[in-house]
Amino acid sequence: MDAITITQERVDRWIKEHGVRYFNELTNMAQLTEEVGEVARIIARRYGEQSEKPSDKEIDLGEELADVLFVVLCLANQTGVDLQAAFDRKLEHKSSRDHDRHHNNPKLKS
């Protein structure tokens, strides 16, 4: 069994054991937007030009990215998406479409 499939199943078990039920799709979409915003704030302040507040320095980027992933997995589960299969198809598509594109991009040359 693939990693994403296992993770989708783990999220589903967690929802059933601890979360009562999934939030509806619109609520989860709003929550995803909120979580992505938190990641954007960290990236902007830690790696961008905005100054980072002392309280921001304590925030774990990995945990915030995991929040995004959790909500994405919830949305996949409740809409019947096999995220592993979708990811595999997407990676294959990007590999065939972009194989030479990035190598030939002068902006990416060191």
Image (cartoon, grey):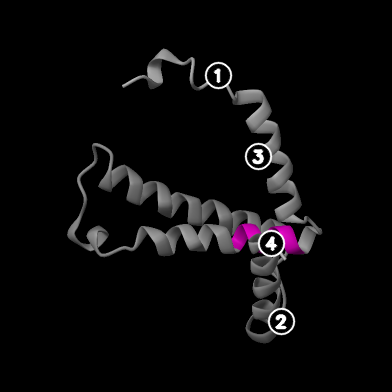
Q: CB of mark 2 within 8 Å of CB of mark 1?
A: no
Residue 90, above or below 11: above
Which of disc 4 and disc 1 is earlier in sequence? 4
As helix, strand or loop, the secondary structure at mark 3 comes to helix
| Three-letter amino acid code at the position of disc 3 | Leu
Mark 2 to mark 3: distance in Å?
31 Å
Q: What stretch is highlighted in magenta?
A: 71-77
Q: Distance between the residues labelled 4 and 3?
A: 15 Å
Query: In which quadrant of the rendered view does residue 20 lie?
Result: bottom right
Residue 7 screen position, x and y as percent: 64, 67
Can you give x and y, in whole percent of width and height, for residue 109 in the image?
A: 36, 19
- Could you tell me what secondary structure mostly forms the magenta stretch? helix
Residue beneath disc 1:
101
**Tag 4 residue:** 2
Determine which residue is flagged by label 2: 16
Q: How many labels does the image show?
A: 4
The tag earlier along the polypeptide, 4 or 3, is: 4
Q: How far from the left and from the top, in percent, is residue 27? A: 65, 61
Nearer the N terminus, badge 2 or badge 3?
2
Q: Are marks 1 and 4 in contact (CB under 8 Å)?
A: no
Mark linked to residue 91: 3
Q: Nearer the viewer, mark 2 or mark 1?
A: 1
